Amino acid sequence: MNQRATVQQLQQRIAEMQPLRLDTVGLPTPIELRPLLPGGALRKGATTSVHGSVQLALALISAVSKDGGWCGAVGLPHLGVEAAATLGIRLDRFVLVGDPGRHALTVTGMLGEVLSALIVHPTGQVSPGESERLAAKLREHGTALIVLGDWPRSDSSLRVTGARWSGLGQGHGLLDTHELTVRSHDRRGGRQHTICFHRGCLVTSLPRLGEVST
């Protein structure tokens, strides 16, 4: 069976299981990430480009998944699904097309007809015309798109400008706390934020100084 037929089967199966979408603009969004996004939420039909962190991209769709929505990722052959699950993404409602070859945008468009939120890592440069055609389809179906890398005319962009690991305490334990400095840019202008992950989960603040991981 070819890839297109496989995706079409997935479309049908997901459409049958997907709950009815409420007629609202915003999708469920982790409270820790709301300051990064226009309107404080991941928006249906909007495109967000993320530079420098697959973990941040997964975190953006985690609340959608927890709420029962179907999510997916295209063009990430080495994605660790364990990391996705740790963030709260339901693997039974997560579609991964690791290597779509030259058809990343086609597969993204097809999945976008039935998924609530979708991550894509395009191979090669995407033209403004290609991005606009895909964006129009996703707006029609109310699907939020997270693009890893550059994307023409994205609604907002998030760029990791710094990263720091911690957690050894008194020389023991694990490097289990990951702090990202993120620069966001959208119609409101640019701002800088700090996002923290502890043991793979989003947290509102770093663990107490001197706390040892076990």
Image (cartoon, grey):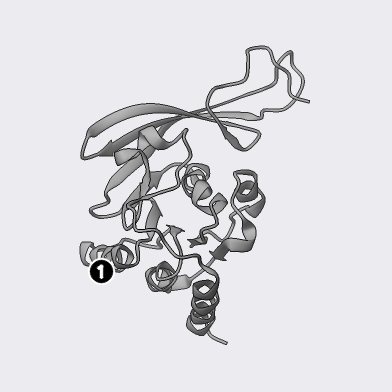
Residue at 40% x, 53% y is 146
Quarter of the image where one finds residue 172: top right
Please provide percent x and percent y for residue 47: 32, 53
Label 1 SS: helix
- Tell me the residue that label 1 is attached to: 133
Residue at 53% x, 72% y is 14
Left or right: residue 138 compared with residue 66: left
Name the foreground residue: 197 vs 90: 90
User: Where 10 falls versus 150 (above or below)?
Assistant: below
Q: Quadrant of the C terminus?
A: top right
Residue at 45% x, 47% y is 28
Query: Within 10 angstroms of label 1, few (less than 14), some, or many (20 or more) residues?
Result: few
User: Where 107 falls versus 94 (above or below)?
Assistant: below
Please provide percent x and percent y for residue 71: 51, 59
Give amino acid for label 1: Arg
Residue at 58% x, 55% y is 79
Please provide percent x and percent y for residue 44: 35, 55
Quarter of the image where one finds residue 130: bottom left
Please provide percent x and percent y for residue 133: 25, 69
User: Where 124 falls versus 184 (above or below)?
Assistant: below
